[in-house]
Image (cartoon, rainbow, N blue to C red):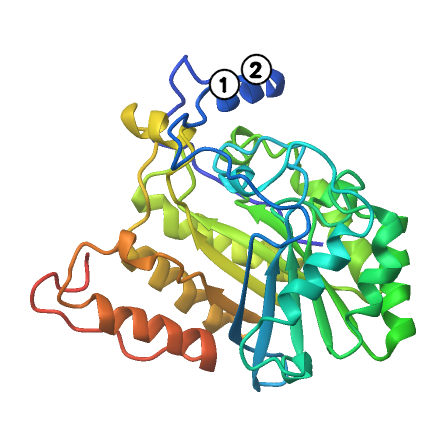
Amino acid sequence: MPEPIFFTEPQHEAAPTFPSGATERDRWILARRPAEAMLARRALDPQQPYEFLLEEERAATGDIVPVATVFLTNRECPWRCLMCDLWRNTLTETVPPGAIPAQIDYALHRLPLAQPHSSARHIKLYNSGSFFDPKAIPPQDYEAIAARLHPFERIVVECHPALLGESCLRFRDLLHAQGDIQLEVAMGLETVHPKIGPKLNKRMTLDGFVRAAAFLREHDIALRVFILVKPPFMDEDEALHWAQRSLDFAFDCGATVAALIPTRAGNGALEELAAQGLFSPPRLATLEAAAAYGIGLNRGRVFADLWDLQKFSGCAHCFAARQARLNEMNMRQTVPAVVACPHCEGSA
């Protein structure tokens, strides 16, 4: 059981325009979704994933393994999280039976270095929501999905803590019927700050997260945790502290992987909070320090999300070296010397 969390009040409180109730927050967030064509919901084919790629990741064994990552097209998540823009790559209706297996086939036959796709030992099936949401992934497709995953050693899916239950166990059992396949579930912890966490509108408590993590542990399902670095309503000075406390909490819950995600604008709601002085993206130095802390714990793998990383850098002179350093941290789970930069002195 994780230790109790002690906290300081955030230096900024939400402006009166940000609602205090969950239903009102839903309306507020939806009303601020961008209307511009480039930022609005994409037109997607339910028979194709909206993205797929082959990446590398350090496994628990220490090996660097190829990972097939497939971003499935499916219905939008029922939660309206304050920081989320994943709805852009979702549908407004549940996909028909057979669509998700077809999407997996589509990706696996087109991935580079994946002919046959058994060269990728791990696969991530991410769906911009919860894999065990029956309105997102039809349960009648579980067997067909599992049948396509027999070449892989580890299957990673994402899910809200509230949706873990019998459907998760059924899918695990279907994977086991294909061979020695480990199921891993990724859950968004986001932050353990007890004042800021509820404002993110995830409708999740820390106690609920602990129970969901215990469920996974009891049933031999691995846990991956997503942690936001500097969510809204948090100053830079306290961002590192709360990323560290969130890492501690995640590993206390039995996580084997913690992914640090710098909070990004782009969904309309965060832009409005930024205009009110209630949000700004984290500095690259904060992400670096959080990753170094987590790796130093030696309690599980810690990965810094490097997507679109340049947005968090204020110094063009040292960015490439700092990006390479973070990538080395991800792959080796060691902490190299901090990049020395005479232009920004490492503060950018």
- Marks 1 & 2, CB-CB < 8 Å contact: yes
Residue at screen point 41% across, 13% down: 17
Q: Where residue 177 sits in the image (x, y, percent)?
A: 92, 72
Placement of 209 over or under 298, stated as above or below: above
Q: Which residue is identified by label 1?
A: 28
Q: Where residue 115 sits in the image (x, y, percent)?
A: 63, 82
Is 175 placed left or right of 107 in the picture?
Answer: right
Q: Residue furthest top?
A: 16
For numbered disc 1, what is the local secondary structure? helix
Placement of 287 over or under 231, stated as above or below: below
Task: Check the picture and name the quadrant holding the N terminus.
Answer: bottom right
Residue at screen point 34% across, 34% down: 279
- Residue 254 visible in the snapshot: no
Residue at screen point 58% across, 17% down: 21
Q: Where residue 164 sits in the image (x, y, percent)?
A: 80, 48
Placement of 77 over or under 184, stated as above or below: above
- Residue 192 visible in the snapshot: yes
Placement of 181 over or under 305, stated as above or below: below
Q: Where residue 147 sits in the image (x, y, percent)?
A: 84, 69
Task: Check the picture and name the quadrant holding the C terminus.
Answer: bottom left
Quarter assignment of residue 293 = bottom left
Dot label at residue 274:
none
Quarter assignment of residue 27 = top right
For numbered disc 2, what is the local secondary structure? helix
| Dot 1 crowding, Cα within 10 Å, few <14, some 14–19, many 20+ | some
| Dot 2 crowding, Cα within 10 Å, few <14, some 14–19, many 20+ | few
Q: Which residue is identified by label 2?
A: 24
Quarter assignment of residue 306 = bottom left
